[in-house]
Amino acid sequence: MTDILKAGCDMLSDHPAGLFPLIESIPGYASSAGLPMKPTVTLRLRKAAEVTLGWAFVGLALAGAFLPLLPTTPFLLLASFLFLRSSPRCHAWLLQNRLFGPFLRDWERHHAVRPAVKWLAVVMVLAVVGATLLSGKLSWPMQIGCIGLCGIGLVVVLRLPTVAAEGEPRSSVALGAVSPKLPPTA
């Protein structure tokens, strides 16, 4: 491994273009006589697959907004990640979307969610699980499993950091750490 690193450092220091030989070695890119890189067929196929998967995850997130036990958030985050890698236009559309945009913008800017989103998720999980249990159509082991999964989901939702009213994340204060604006206390 050290030989590879040493060879890479020697290549960068010896080559007048700096990183150019290293970039040329990345699979999916090809250069032509020092011109900007052109995506190869492999890169185009990968991007097309990422866009297709991104739209599939948007569809699953939309379905998850209305169907019990199908989560919305992980599918949105996956779609956002894939669009960020493959299609700036699709990523911008997702961020500007009326339904999903505010949540994703908060997550990208602050890695946190608004308190209203958190409490809506808690209420929806409790309502859906409560209705499922009250229907009486599940066996006892299934009811216990449903309650266990509900508990795990609620712990995950309640542990998400929240965004303060002015847009500043409150996660460090909520977890008991010292706030960066306040001097440390003894």
Image (spheres, rainbow, N blue to C red):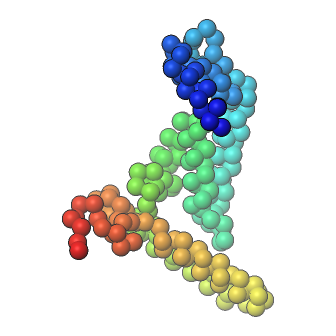
Query: Vertical placement of 144 versus 182: above or below?
Result: below
Q: Quadrant of the N terminus?
A: top right
Res 135 quadrant in image: bottom right
Q: Position of residue 116 (x, y in %)?
A: 42, 69
Whether residue 52 sits left or right of residue 185 in the image: it is right
Q: Quadrant of the C terminus?
A: bottom left
Can you see residue 131? no
Residue plotted at (66% across, 66% down):
70
Residue plotted at (58% across, 54% down):
76
Q: Position of residue 108 (x, y in %)?
A: 45, 51
Residue at the extreme top of the image, as rendered: 33
In the foreground, 25 or 136: 25
Residue plotted at (61% across, 8% down):
33
Q: Position of residue 100 (x, y in %)?
A: 51, 54
Res 113 quadrant in image: bottom left
Can you see residue 130? yes
In the foreground, 167 or 92: 167
Whether residue 119 sits left or right of residue 70 in the image: it is left
In the foreground, 72 or 77: 77
In the foreground, 159 or 138: 159
Residue at the extreme left of the image, as rendered: 183
Q: Position of residue 61 (x, y in %)?
A: 62, 58
